[in-house]
Amino acid sequence: MRTVLRAQAAEARLVLGLCWALLLLGVGSAWSQLGSAEGEPFAGRLATALLASAGAVLFARLQLSVSRGGAALGRRWLAPLVMATSLAPLLWGSASPMLVVAWAAALLQRDLRRSLVSSGLLLAVLVWVFPRSRLAAMGTFADLFFELLLYTVVLVTATRLAVLLDELRLTREVLARRRVDAERERVGRDLHDIMGRTLVAASLRNQAALRALGDRDPAGSRELERLHDTIGRGQAQLRELTSGPVVTRLDEELETCRMLCERVQIELAVDVRREPPVEQAALVAQVVRQSVTDLLGHSRATRCRIVLDRDDFVTVVTVTNDGSVPREEPPASRPAGQLARAVVAAGGSIGTEHASGGLATRTVRLPIRSGVPA
C-alpha cells in the first residue's frame, strides 16, 4: 500500500489524506464510546471500535486499488469485506459511525453491475435493521439515508478526484514529450527543405567546376571529387536525420526515460546485458522511447523494467510494467503502429503479453545482420 501511495501525484496524495482524516474521525468516535457507561455492554462497544478500525484500513486499501499501480491490491472479496465490517455492529444494535464506508465501498467496485447490486442489498439491510437498532433513536430513516448519502458522495468523489489528478499529471508528461517530438519533426522538415536545397546547389556547382576544370589540373580535380563525395555523404546523412525516427542516442534515451519515470514516481530498472549493434541502436532507442510513452499514456504502472540483450543472431528488447491493461493494437498511423512497422521493416517481431495483476511485457526481437561481430 505504501508503494502505491508514493506512486501517486502529490495532489492525489493530498486528497486521499483528507479522506483518511475523515475516516480517522469516525474511528476516533467509535473508540471514544468505550468510556460510556450507558447503553450496550463494553464488549459490544469494543467490537464496534475494532471493526471500525479494520473497516477504515480495508477501505483505504480499496481506494488505492483503483489508483495507478494498485491493481494488485484489488480482490473480489475486498469490497464485500469492507461492507461486512461496517454493517456487523448493527447485529447487536450498535450505531457504527463507519456505515458510510460500506456504501462507498460498494460504489468503488470496478464492475458497475456489482456496485448496483451491492448498493441495493445494503439499502435493503438498512431498511430491515433500522427499527431494531439504536439508529432509530437518532432520527428517522430518511435522516439517516440522506446523511449516509452525503458522506458517501464525499468519499467516492474524493477518491475519483485523486485518480483523476494522478492521471492528469501523467497526461501532462506525455503531452510535453509529444510536443517535443512534434517540434523536432518540424525542425527536421525545415532543415531538410533549407539545407537540402543548399546541398543540391553545392553539388551542382561542384559538378560544373569539375567539367570546367577537365584534365588541366588533376590535383584540383581530385579535390573537387573528394568535395563531391563529402556533399553526397552530407545529403545521405540529412535524409537519414529528417526521415528516420526522432530519437537521440540509446544511452541518452535511457537516461531521458529514467528521469521521466522518476518525475512521476515510476520505479525504472534498466538492465543492459549486451548492447545492440551500432546499426540497430537507433531502432532500439525508438522501441524504448515508444514503450515508455505508452506506459505513461495507457497504464497505471508503478514499476517498469527494461532489459536489453542479444546473441550472435538477434537483439531482444523487453519492457515490463505492472500497470497495463489489454487493449486493441493501434492503427499503423499512430506512434505505436509506426513502431511496429519499423520493427517489421527491419525483419523483426513485436509482441505484448498480459498477465494477472496488470503485468504486461512487450518483447521486440531484431535479427542481426550476418557479419556483425558479437
Image (tube, rainbow, N blue to C red):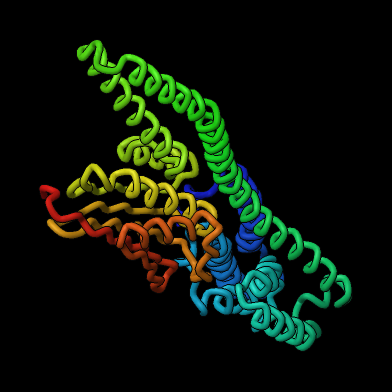
Let me know if residue 153 appears in the view.
Answer: yes
Would you say 26 lies left or right of 211 here?
right
Residue 264 sits above or below residue 159 on the image: above
Where is residue 332? Give x, y as percent.
Answer: 52, 62
Would you say 213 lies left or right of 290 here?
left
Where is residue 126? Give x, y as percent.
Answer: 75, 82
Where is residue 277? Give x, y as percent.
Answer: 21, 46
Please report the residue visible at 82 percent of the width from the left and 73 percent of the height from the top. Answer: 145
- The quadrant of the image that shows the N terminus is bottom left
Please report the residue visible at 67 percent of the width from the left and 82 percent of the height from the top. Answer: 113
**How many numbered marks appear?**
0
**Which one is nearer the viewer's eye here, 302 or 327?**
327
Please report the residue visible at 64 percent of the width from the left and 69 percent of the height from the top. Answer: 108
Residue 335 sits above or below residue 221 on the image: below
Residue 89 sits above or below residue 22 on the image: below
Residue 243 sits above or below residue 3 on the image: above
Where is residue 367? Give x, y as percent.
Answer: 23, 59
**Which one is nearer the viewer's eye here, 305 or 166?**
305
**Which one is nearer the viewer's eye here, 58 or 75?**
75
Let me know if residue 17 appears in the view.
Answer: no
Please report the residue visible at 47 percent of the width from the left and 56 percent of the height from the top. Answer: 338
Would you say 225 lies left or right of 337 here?
left
Would you say 108 lies left or right of 316 here?
right
